[in-house]
Amino acid sequence: MSELKTLYQDIILDHNKSPRNFKKLENANRHAEGYNPLCGDHYNIYLRVENDIIQEVSFEGAGCAISKASASVMSSLLKGKTKAEAEELIHVFHKLVTGDADPMEELDRLGKLAAFAGVSEFPARVKCASLAWHTLRAALENKNDVISTEK
Amino acid sequence: MKVAAETIAPLTSKDTLDVGRIRADFPILNRKVNGKPLVYLDNAATTQKPSVVVESLRRYYLEENSNIHRGVHYLSQKATEGYEGTRKKMRTFINAPDAHEIIFVRGTTEGINLVAHSFVRERIKPGEEILITGMEHHSNIVPWQIVCEMTGAHLRVVPINDKGEIIMEEYEKRLTPKVKFVSIVHISNSLGTVNPVKQMIEMAHAHDIPVLIDGAQTVSHKKVDVQDLDCDFFVFSGHKMFGPTGIGILFGKSEYLEQMPPYQGGGDMIKSVTFEKTIYNDLPYKFEAGTPNIAGVIALGSAVDYINGIGLDSIYAYEQDLLAYATAAVLGVDGLRIIGTAKNKSAVISFMLEDVHPHDIGTIIDAEGVAIRTGHHCTQPVMQRFGIPATARASFAVYNTKDEVDALIRGIDKARKVFQ
């Protein structure tokens, strides 16, 4: 149960229950769709990027608590970030959930994302946590293909 | 433990089954997972293996390993006896008319692919149809899509109702002269529905359409008699009936198997080979190219002995009782909905919990030592039919107990609390 507690942190439960920025962004100029065919998790990420800065971000879709909270926390961190800063966040998050980063050392950069450190103990759930982030990268690159966890 | 399965006395008296004794035959059931006793409820994915099956594999490799149908030496004969002995046991197990109608394949999937390519693809013409149902496993969908793509035939699907039952009027309607083959699952792995296959075969035969039955979820739960069913093909996997992975059975009626070209070429499937002309071997060897999974076949024989030792009638009665208990128990959980409520069901319960995604249930209950499956169960069209992304599924075997059902309920309660 102690490991479970580290997976289902309060922040994660809260963002799952009340996801932030959970809507379609009507004036988005970047969009990507992410899908995990193994479990059916499915999200759309919308961005409005102007002068290389993310002005607005939103997402909609459905999936498990880990995937939804991950998308929600992600959306709450992106506003005002440059594309490069967002890329850096994607990189750090990936390291965190695959167990390649020490959350204590990276606390400054991680902030709220540190709540996802427990995911690395559950290899079967890494894809849940990563889905929104892969989709974000595709949106930033303005790729219109559906991003799948199984490619 | 060195006990030949044949020497085990029947475990059952008239109506009761000694589940304690059965559990003792499966050493893995004694282990702990995440510090809790393992509660294994993922039997529709694969069943656990009794010691006799593992012992059979061990004995083959350590004491009898040799290739079959080749040498005149002692070990080769021993291996051949074990291999062909299992074929005879499988014939009896499903009451096939002849042992040469039992083809060893890798599993249900390979069996379906063999029939798809050596039988259906050979005969079907552009515009003709293959009929399946809305509750098929991907392994009984994709091979037919491939055949359709190669031949210009069309795949037609019989819809299912909200309980997860085949709509028989719709089936009848789709049995048109265009249909050249019907392939249906006996028991749904994701819904638990037991389909009225005998009736469905009869209906197809009235139109001279041959039928394949996917029996993957049947054989360790319910007695099968292929002559009574009158199915033209019947396929199943060893690993879902307490046997090893990588071995399965294709039963086919001789009249069809004789007409079919080989699925693969190689050793053992020939009578004579010259560069000009090869003469294929007789049944069943025509379909068993290359050195087969000898150890797997021999161990599958032990698995069949094991099942026979308990008796499928007792197993069926025991599991139906467990299913009734488990169904009532899960329905007692607030916000829980069962997907698949057919009148005639096998011991499989797929469910959704309000506000808790199946994957989260799976992870939380795994921490309690309870193994269930979450996801689409290789039946994505079933998920689409019910408008859901996934389910959590508890699937039972003869070694499961009511105490384990209670552990499942405690796990679900824990998941609810985490997400409250």
Image (cartoon, coloured by chain):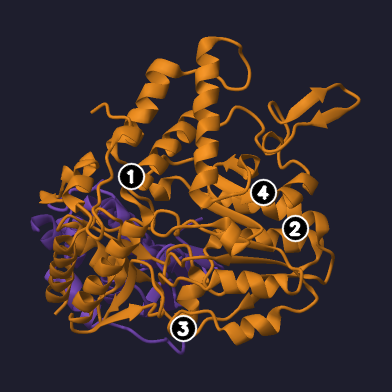
Chain colours: A purple, B orange
**Quick one: label 2 or label 1, which is nearer the N terminus?**
2
In the displayed orientation, state which residue is furthest to the right: B276
Residue kind at label 2, given as amino acid type: Val
Q: CA distance from mark 2 to mark 4?
A: 9 Å
Q: CA distance from mark 3 to mark 4?
A: 50 Å
Callout 2–callout 3 Cβ contact below 8 Å: no
Q: Which residue is rendered at x = 54% and y = 38% of the image? A: B88
The residue marked by circle 1 belongs to what chain?
Answer: B
Asked whether residue A15 is in view, the answer is no
Callout 4–callout 1 Cβ contact below 8 Å: no
Q: CA distance from mark 3 to mark 1?
A: 66 Å
Residue kind at label 3, given as amino acid type: Ala
Q: With respect to residue B118, does B329 lie above or below?
A: below
Q: With respect to residue B241, does B350 lie above or below?
A: below
Q: Which residue is mark 4?
A: B114
Residue kind at label 1, given as amino acid type: Gly
* Residue A40 x, y percent position in the rendering: 42, 70
* Mark 2 crowd level (few <14, some 14–19, many ≥20, 10 Å Cα): many
What label does residue A77 carry, if any?
A: none
Q: Nearer the viewer, mark 3 or mark 1?
A: 1
**Helix, strand or loop for disc 4:** helix
* Residue B91 x, y percent position in the rendering: 55, 44
**Helix, strand or loop for disc 2:** helix
Q: CA distance from mark 4 to mark 1?
A: 32 Å
What label does residue B309 carry, if any?
A: 1
* Residue A149 x, y percent position in the rendering: 45, 59
* Mark 1 crowd level (few <14, some 14–19, many ≥20, 10 Å Cα): some
Q: Which residue is mark 3?
A: A28
**Helix, strand or loop for disc 1:** helix
Q: CA distance from mark 2 to mark 3?
A: 50 Å
Residue kind at label 4, given as amino acid type: Leu
Q: CA distance from mark 2 to mark 1?
A: 37 Å
